[in-house]
Image: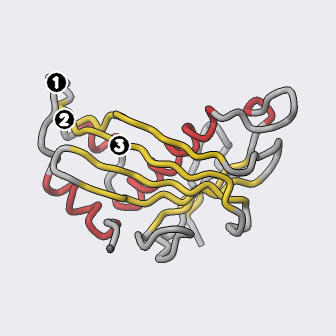
Amino acid sequence: MGEQESDSTTGGKYCYASAMRQKPVSSSAPAVETRTRVRYAETDQMGIAHHANYIVWFELGRTDLCRATGVTYRSIEELGFLLVVAEVRCRYRIPFRYDDDVLIRTSVADAASRSMTFRYEVLDGSGTQLHATGESVHLWLSALSRKPVVADRDVMAAFAPLLRKE
């Protein structure tokens, strides 16, 4: 299914991106899937995954989505651009517990000349039970000036196949 990715946070054992899926749970946009597992350090005293971890899982998904396009965050930075977070939202539905399998589906909701919006669905390992949904808005900045710029044309072309079809 997906290519195994090496990741220091999961030891490469559970975090991997799959080929683009055509039918995420609640949207018509192609998505990339990432898997991880709730680690003990990510839980509170009740054994429930702390809410802040969902934002970290969003980043895992977004990073894998970029990698699936052939444009990594590193290559974006090497081109002199930064894609910075301007806004993040998360709707929590069902908590995860220690050692649960987590499936993150990430899609591109919008790609404008100076910003991008990503959507996330966080599901159980089987992909049948929705635990959370979210969205993050990112701005393109110059790595040198830290001011908004128009995104690189080739980078945006790489994201085009993932754009939401409405």
For the residues marked 1 and 2, what is the alpha-carbon distance in whole angstroms?
A: 7 Å
The reply to whether dot 3 and dot 2 touch (C-beta < 8 Å) is: no
User: Which colour assignment does the render follow?
Assistant: secondary structure
Percent coordinates x, y for residue 88 in the rendering: 45, 38
Label 3: few (<14), some or many (≥20) within 10 Å? some
| Residue type for callout 2 | Gly
Instruction: Give the label on residue 96, or none.
Output: none
The numbered mark, 3 or 1, whose residue comes first in the sequence reads 3
For the residues marked 3 and 1, what is the alpha-carbon distance in whole angstroms?
A: 21 Å
Q: Quadrant of the N terminus?
A: bottom right
Q: Quadrant of the C terminus?
A: bottom left
Per the image, label 1 sits on a secondary structure element best described as loop
Percent coordinates x, y for residue 7 in the rendering: 59, 43
Residue lying farthest bottom? Answer: 22
**Left or right: residue 30 compared with residue 58:** left
Q: Which residue is mark 3?
A: 137
Per the image, label 2 sits on a secondary structure element best described as loop
| Residue type for callout 1 | Leu
Vertical comparison of 42 with 5: above or below? above
| Residue type for callout 3 | Val
Rendered residue at 61%/54% (across/down):
122
Rendered residue at 34%/33% (across/down):
86
Instruction: Give the label on residue 80, or none.
Output: 2
The numbered mark, 3 or 2, whose residue comes first in the sequence reads 2
Residue 69 figure quarter: bottom left
Residue lying farthest right? Answer: 46
Percent coordinates x, y for residue 160 in the rendering: 26, 66
Number of the front mark, 3 or 2:
3
The reply to whether dot 1 and dot 2 touch (C-beta < 8 Å) is: yes
Instruction: Give the label on residue 144, or none.
Output: 1
